[in-house]
Image (cartoon, rainbow, N blue to C red):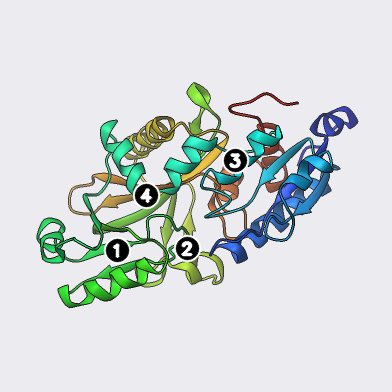
Amino acid sequence: MSTLTPSEIAALGKVGVLFGGRSAEREVSIMSGTGVLNALKSKGVDAHAFDPAERPIAELAAEAYDRVFIALHGRYGEDGSLQGALELLGIPYTGSGVMASSVGMDKITTKIVWLANGVPTPKYAVIDDGTDLDKVVADLGLPLIVKAPLEGSSIGITKVTRREELEAAVELSRKYDARVLAEQFIEGREFSVPLLGSGPTARALPVIEIVAPEGNYDYQNKYFTDTTQYHCPAPLDAATTEAIQADVEKAYRALGCEGWSRIDVLLRESDGKHFLLEVNTSPGMTGHSLVPMAARAEGTSYEDLCVAILRTASLKIGQKK
């Protein structure tokens, strides 16, 4: 772990670490933000906890924060709404801007952008009140995946193996979103690829393979058990690794992402083709999280990673006051 000089610490100024929030991912966000806060403090940074569920965002300006590290996940933190507020307040922030955050949060809109840019993603259907569910099954086949398009951390997701299970799966997702995403099921291996940087300098970190118990990488197995296995770098041949990283970088740029993100990928067993599932524009920073894991594989400590991300904090629309 490198040491920051007094001038480097001073340049970062007073830092707010935003975590907690009001989304269904509050618990995970608290774990992420606590880790980031402790890491920044260990480097001498003047960092402070700030929970937008408990304090008005305007207090960030009133208390003269120079920049913020967004460790919020899900709605009101990862969906562009917070980013817009920070732009209005003139406070630089980590991660993507308003548009990329909003588009990336919506799995349906993400797919539309990716398909328009030639990025491989599973076939899908949007389910609302007037949707013919029999047609969805005919088009996508079984099994299929049903998701809440505006939630993360595997919240509101169901693998449907029989037609009679579909209504219940849709109703579960509708607890979170009015529209529901049905997606072709890809039988194969699961990967995730973190990214750092912006524009032409953005690059994919090492590919991580995720091997969950019985293939079920759900909320519990993501954050609260030690039975899920992670292989980083993933045991793939060079050509497959490079192809996945190239498409991940293409997908990241197509959405206009900045700073850092993580994109989930499936590799189909039958033909070796890969498919991108979704982007996380404010990835987890917990003890089980994948961005720190990939950074460690390149020799970067958790603490140094947090500082590197913090240094990218910026305004994407306005200018700092």
Residue tagged by mark 3? Answer: 83
In screen coordinates, is 99 left or right of 224? left
Q: Which callout, 3 or 2, points at the residue further toward the start of the chain?
A: 3
Q: Quadrant of residue 214?
A: bottom left
Q: Nearer the viewer, mark 3 or mark 1?
A: 3
**Residue 104 pos. (x, y %):** 44, 43
In what element is the residue under mark 3? helix
Q: Nearer the viewer, mark 3 or mark 2?
A: 3
Q: Nearer the viewer, mark 3 or mark 4?
A: 3
Q: Which callout, 2 or 4, points at the residue further toward the start of the chain?
A: 4
In what element is the residue under mark 4? helix
Q: Which mark is residue 146?
A: 1
What residue appears at the point 35 percent right and 72 percent down from the top-left corner? 172
Residue tagged by mark 2? Answer: 229
**Residue 258 pos. (x, y %):** 54, 33
What residue appears at the point 28 percent right and 76 percent down from the top-left corner? 168
Which class describes the residues within 10 Å of circle 3: few (<14), some (14-19), or many (20+)? Answer: many
Q: Which callout, 2 or 1, points at the residue further toward the start of the chain?
A: 1
In screen coordinates, is 190 left or right of 81? left
